[in-house]
Image (cartoon, grey):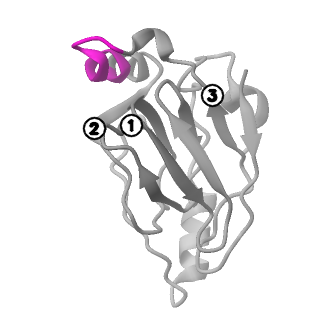
Amino acid sequence: MAKYFTIQENKPFPNSTLTVIYYPEIIADKLNREDTSQKVLSFFEQNGYTNGWVGSIYTYHHFHSNTHEVLACISGDAEVQLGGPNAEIYSFKAGDVVLLPAGVAHKLITASKDFQIVGAYPDGKEPDMQRGDLEHYSEIKERIRQVSKPKYDPVKHLEGGVIKNWKE
């Protein structure tokens, strides 16, 4: 069952009025195989999330102002801060998937040695890299407001949180 978090504005991190959608252990059936990362990338592609990659989360606060981002933990576990400095820290473990709305800051705090994730973007968008810019803050917020709602949820296609909870 999905969980939803609202991440409040925390200048210079705009975050979002859309909820973060967290699916605990939703892809557990795709783990512990030789081709785990490829299975998860294909799963996301079937739901319209492409331009995928395999790696980790940056160890500094950052966000994307031009696209949403889905992350799936395929091994290990980590603590990830969402929302910028002094914001809440969340656990992220193998099998979990999180969809971050455009503007939501995220940073890796700690991770097991085997921590690895798969990431992708709706319609294969190329994400920009934002690290919190007060000088251009209003322009960045406007760019975030213009990011459209994805056609599909990355996990549940037409049944998931994007369809049920995200309003444009």
Residue visible at 60% across and 58% down in the picture: 82
**Amino acid residing under circle 1:** Ala
Residue visible at 68% across and 22% down in the picture: 160
Q: Looking at the rendered structure, which numbered label has been put on residue 23?
A: 3
The verdict on residue 12 being magenta is no
Span highlighted in magenta in the image: 32-41
Residue 166 visible here:
no
Q: Quadrant of the C terminus?
A: top right
Query: Which residue is disc 1 drawn over?
Result: 120
Q: Is residue 64 above or below residue 48?
A: below
Q: Looking at the rendered structure, which numbered label has been put on residue 13?
A: none
Q: Looking at the rendered structure, which numbered label has been put on residue 53?
A: 2
Question: At which x and y percent is residue 127?
Answer: 37, 54
**Amino acid residing under circle 2:** Trp
Nearer-N-terminus badge (2/3):
3
Q: Is residue 161 above or below residue 139?
A: above
Label 2 Cα crowd, 10 Å radius (few <14 / some 14-19 / many 20+): some
Q: Are marks 2 and 3 in contact (CB under 8 Å)?
A: no
Give the secondary structure at mark 2.
Answer: strand
15 vs 31, nearest the viewer: 31
Question: At which x and y percent is residue 146?
Answer: 59, 57
Separation (CA) of disc 3 from disc 1: 15 Å
The verdict on residue 37 being magenta is yes
**53 sits left or right of 107 in the view:** left
Nearer-N-terminus badge (1/2):
2
- Outermost residue on the left side: it is 34
